[in-house]
Image (cartoon, rainbow, N blue to C red):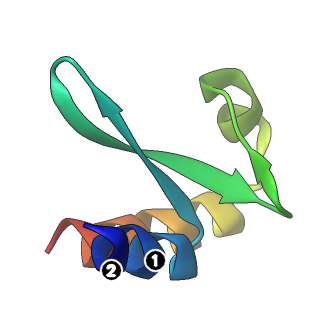
Amino acid sequence: MGRIKKQVEKLSFKLQFTSDGAVTIPVYEGKELTDEEYDKLPEDIKINMKKKRLKSDN
């Protein structure tokens, strides 16, 4: 499991486990983002993060 967490962190996300399963939390400039903070990011950064998240989901 540690290997998976490290791979996800390389893609600028944090892996968090909930009662429903695992979720990825976006990290930007070393800070975990809330939904509101993520929504305020410039579109090009959000697109890049979405691409990275797709890689982590595979």
* Circle number at residue 17: none
Percent position of residue 6, x then y: 46, 77
Percent position of residue 35, x then y: 60, 26
Q: Residue at x 53, y 71 (%)?
A: 9
Q: Nearer the viewer, residue 14 or 49?
A: 14
Q: Residues within 10 Å of mark 1 (few under 14, many from 20)?
A: some
Query: Which residue, given by chain and number where applicable, does mark 2 sit on?
Result: 3
Q: Residue at x 43, y 63 (%)?
A: 50
Q: Nearer the viewer, residue 42 or 35?
A: 35
Q: Secondary structure at mark 2?
A: helix
* Badge 2 vs badge 1, beta-carbon distance below 8 Å: yes
Mark 2 to mark 1 CA distance (whole Å): 5 Å
Q: Residue at x 77, y 55 (%)?
A: 42
Q: Quadrant of residue 4?
A: bottom left
Q: Quadrant of residue 23?
A: top left
Q: Quadrant of residue 17?
A: top left
Q: Secondary structure at mark 1?
A: helix
Q: Is residue 20 above or below residue 14?
A: above
Q: Quadrant of the C terminus?
A: bottom left
